[in-house]
Amino acid sequence: MDIFNTPISRKGTYCTQWDFCEDRFGVHDIIPFSISDMDLPIPQAITKALQKRLEHPVLGYSRWQHSEYLNAICHWYGQKYDTVIDANWITYSPSVMYSIAKALELLTVPEDSVLTFTPAY
């Protein structure tokens, strides 16, 4: 794919990966491999969808749990993985770490052993 051959510098954009190495690692001249932030252009379909949304003059809080959104997720799983997903299975998570903590809370009991691998998020 062409996007992997198009380097994009994110330095000077308040990018955690590149602009804040020194406060995270104590040195400024390193290549950070610490976070899952990618220096690739946004796919055109996403750019077009964002541009279309920005044509509306108001940006406010939106609800995520409406049928159009949930059905899009169900459709994607069906197309990508030939799997049927019930919209009622879909729930909100504010972060990856919250989801991991919630999964541990729901699937383990005190004194259970839990194995994690490094590097870890």
Image (cartoon, rainbow, N blue to C red):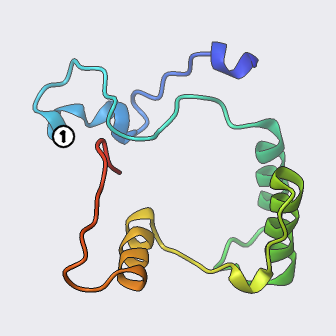
> Residue 99 sits in which quadrant?
bottom left
**Residue holding disc 1:** 24
Q: Can residue 27 be seen from the camera position used here?
A: yes
> Residue 72 sits in which quadrant?
bottom right
Q: Can residue 63 be seen from the camera position used here?
A: no
Farthest residue toward the top?
5
Three-letter amino acid code of the residue under disc 1: Arg
Name the spot of residue 10 as percent of width and height, x first: 47, 29
Residue occupying the point 58% across, 78% down? 92
Residue occupying the point 30% across, 41% down? 119
Picture layout, residue 53 above or below residue 1: below
Q: Nearer the viewer, residue 12 or 47?
A: 47
Picture layout, residue 66 above or below residue 76: below
Residue occupying the point 85% across, 82% down? 67
Dot 1 crowding, Cα within 10 Å, few <14, some 14–19, many 20+: few
Name the spot of residue 4 as percent of width and height, x first: 65, 19
Question: Which structural element holds mark 1?
Answer: helix
Quadrant including the N terminus: top right
> Residue 13 sits in which quadrant?
top left
What is the tally of numbered marks visible in this picture? 1
Picture layout, residue 30 above or below residue 100: above
Farthest residue toward the left?
26
